[in-house]
Image (cartoon, rainbow, N blue to C red):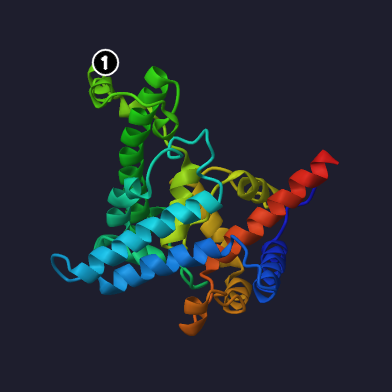
Amino acid sequence: MCERKIEDVLRRAEKMYRGVEVMRDCGFPSGELAWEECYLAFRKAREARPNGGTSPEYEQLKEQACLRLAIYLATFGMYRRSSFISGLDASAHMPVVELLLEKRYDGLKEFPGSSPADSKSISDSKWNEALLALVDEMCAYYSKVKSQALLFKEFYGGFPGQLAEETLKERESIKAKRPVDADKAGVSRVLITKILMGAFGSVPAYDRYFCAGAKACGLPQTFSRRSFPKLCGFVRGGWGAVEEAAKGMKFLTAEGAELGLHYPPMRVIDKGMWCLGLEVENSEVR
């Protein structure tokens, strides 16, 4: 099978977008809009962030971003019962939300090397270094959360949200029974990249169907220092068409539409690659 081109990805993204638009117009809003709500919540929080310290408005917007992140993750399949976050309250994401809103990561909301004339290797760029630093910090936090959740599962037969009622003293004793080994609690790159897509819109979610689509395009199916820049190069190679497609995909939520926003380029690629991967896997099943 010949490798798919950027046009194949964009065509499928546009088809999916039109479907979501039709559902919205019929009064049956798609769960896809949960991404828009999440993206907008982070956008508003960044705009309201004080130069120093905090403010009541900013704290409220952080809480909204945290809630919208949890809803988006749940809508996009990350709260399945087998997931370590399935039994956790949305507030468990707050440390990561605060991290995502730090000023040093503001540049990640822009697509790296969008100009076709920019031939500098993305893998060695400051943008990529900032992204990898953020990913490391996110993984470190969620590893600790996951390791604690696994202790609950081991000692009580379920994740925190699935526990039978036990005494507070017994729950607290879990920590003393075995030390938490965060290094052994690997965190899925699917979770990390879905969060990055929700907060910045510049990194696609490397889930099952996206990876199948990437494979069909001759691209790596993993997220890493070296593989992600290859995807960026693929997008940059057809930048004119990608930019045109993104401009045609306006936000469908009332707030996003009022602001005149359109989808970031990588959100377009995320949608199109996912659709391509689903199509490829379905054809293989037949």
The front one of 42 and 190 is 42
Q: Position of residue 92 (x, y in %)?
A: 33, 45
Q: Residue furthest right?
A: 286
The front one of 236 and 40 is 40
Residue at 13% x, 65% y: name it: 53
Q: Residue furthest left?
A: 53
160 versus 75 height, above or below: above
Q: Amino acid at mark 1?
A: Lys
Q: Is residue 93 left or right of residue 230?
A: left
Q: Position of residue 208 (x, y in %)?
A: 62, 43
Residue at 42% x, 38% y: name it: 87
263 versus 179 height, above or below: below
196 versus 164 height, above or below: below
Q: Quadrant of the C terminus?
A: top right
Q: Quadrant of residue 84?
A: top left
- Can residue 88 be seen at all in this image of the molecule? yes
Q: Position of residue 26 (x, y in %)?
A: 70, 74
According to the picture, the residue beneath numbered tag 1 turns out to be 177
